Amino acid sequence: MKALVLAGGRGNRLTELSRKQNKCMIKIHGKHLIEYNLDGALDVDVDEIVIVVGYKAETIINLLGTNYKGKPIRYVIQSEQKGLVHAIECAQQTIDGDDFFLMLGDEVLFNRKNQAMIYEFNSNKEIFGICGIVKVSDRNQIKKTYTIIGGHSNDIYRLIEKPRHPLNDFQGTGHCVFRNQIYNYIKYTPIHHERNEKELPDLIQCAIDDAMTIKAFIICDKYTNINTYEDVKMANGFFHE
């Protein structure tokens, strides 16, 4: 299994923090944002870390080089920032047929449970993918990512990107694990009518609609995806509560 870390975006709403560097280089509690996710990849002993870079790619490459704490790194250039599904597609050749653990380079997960999620994935070959989710007290947080609708045994039946009216307390994260065959569904993924790019929940939905088993897994206690100054404040706050 490989780790696939998506770190191509700028973070337009972070203005000065991301003007001269990729937003994954922002420091949270004294540590670069992307390093939290690389440490998460080491939790599960992946064979290799693949990082998709784009905006200010050199700031990430110069920091990390080709090795992170003994684990080899390979880079993929996303020359145009056309969304998460496009970034995943850019990495297909480098993933080279392996299953992969997907992470967004701008996520912060507090008390992450990566090992347990990967163990569940590896213990049942019928599982096509697992989406890491978190239970939140403020449903407005769910509007920033996606929500899920599920059934028994944590099966997911529906994913909704940035729901206007979340139906439950579960927020989807970018921490997911997939069989390599998820690549077969990129060509069927619709382009979102508002953002004009293919969205991760829609890619996963295509697999569900084809009778693939996608599970939900509580991946952490607290979570945020860094897009605004308020998100930075929230992430720093995790370490002081």
Image (tube, rainbow, N blue to C red):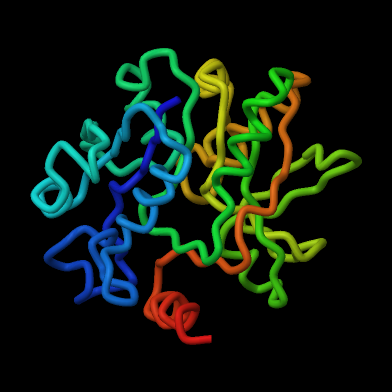
Left or right of residue 63, residue 174 in this image: right
Left or right of residue 10, residue 204 in this image: right
Pick the residue in front: 97 or 113.
113
Q: What x and y, as percent, mark residue 120?
A: 68, 34
Q: Is residue 93 above or below residue 83?
A: above
Q: Is residue 230 above or below residue 95?
A: below
Left or right of residue 90, residue 234 in this image: right
Q: What x and y, as percent, mark residue 191?
A: 52, 36
Q: Residue at x 47, y 83 (%)?
A: 237
Image quarter of the N terminus: top left
Q: What x and y, as percent, mark residue 172?
A: 63, 53
Residue 228 lies in quadrant = bottom left
Q: Residue at x 57, y 57 (%)?
A: 145
Q: Residue furthest right?
A: 152
Q: Is residue 155 above or below residue 128?
A: below
Residue 28 lies in quadrant = bottom left
Q: Is residue 26 above or below residue 69?
A: below
Q: Residue at x 44, y 59 (%)?
A: 107
Q: Residue at x 61, y 37 (%)?
A: 202
Q: What x and y, as percent, mark residue 185?
A: 57, 21
Left or right of residue 135, residue 91 in this image: left
Q: Residue furthest bottom?
A: 241
Pick the residue in front: 54 or 34.
34
Residue 154 lies in quadrant = top right
Pick the residue in front: 34 or 114.
114
